Amino acid sequence: MNELLWIVLLLLDFAAIMLSFRYWGKLGLYIWVPISIIIANIQVTKNISLFGIEATLGNIVYATGFLATDILNEFYGKKASAKAVKIGFFALLSMTILMQAALLFEPSSSDIAQGSLSTIFGLMPRIAIGSMIAYVISNFHDVWAFAFWKAKKPGRNTLWLRNNLSTFVSQLIDTLLFTFIAFWGVYPTSVLVQIIVSTFVLKWIVAICDTPFIYLARSWYEQGKITEDAI
């Protein structure tokens, strides 16, 4: 059942990012990046069994952030892509600070949320620190790598190559940094290894699956179908 739900979630995330780009252009991608990073850092607190291995939820929506920055890099340039990374970092930092402040409030006797919020966001400082470090390093690498391969291999026919090469390496950097910072000592070593392997493999699958969507984005862009709202 989890495998089927994972595929459905994958399609929903791709649909959301493509609709954001189709109807709001660059602004839509700037909106999607903080959405993806906030949701991913909440979903990552949930462990699931997927294809027979331990995995954390949140891999799909987080990986779509790389698709957003690659689309920005392809059509609007390296600076626009880097700007999205900075927006995502600000969103994650803001969520962490505000939710930690919310947990400090003494709940009333009628409150039903404090326990659940503490369970989810009590882990948030360590997860957020790991995520912020991994996010900044991996995403700025992705921005640089995509621009590098774009200069080396320009054109429509090699779009899949620069999209995947930049994302694959960036995902490896992100997975190693985040997992060790966020979960070292939290889970047994065997579970930690499974999380690293499963997270990396799942992110690669998402990266491969996003290739048709970046070509769809290019097709829309070349046909003038993208609505560019003022920024």
Image (cartoon, rainbow, N blue to C red):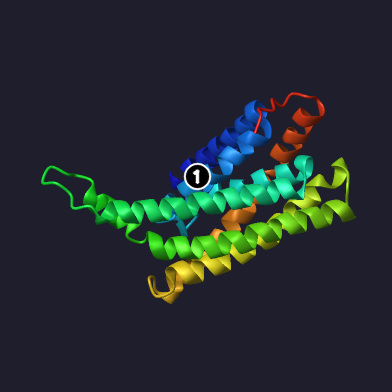
Q: Is residue 103 above or below residue 231?
A: below
Query: Residue 15 appears at what percent x and percent y?
Result: 59, 33
**How many badges with numbers are in the image?**
1
Quadrant of the snapshot with the C terminus: top right
- Residue 51 falls left or right of residue 207: left
- Estimate how packed mark 1 is, as few (under 14), some (14 to 19) or many (20 or more) residues with alpha carbons within 10 Å: some
Q: Secondary structure at mark 1?
A: helix
Residue 110 placement, left or right of 222: left
| Quarter placement of the N terminus | top left
Residue that badge 1 annotates: 6
- Image quadrant in which you'd find residue 184: bottom left
Q: Is residue 149 left or right of residue 62?
A: right
Along the line of sight, the residue nearer the viewer: 105 or 65: 105
Q: Residue at x 76, y 37 (%)?
A: 215
Q: Is residue 95 left or right of residue 32?
A: left
In the rendered image, the vertical position of residue 70 relative to residue 53, given as above or below: above
The x and y percentages for residue 192 are 46, 70
Callout 1 amino acid: Trp
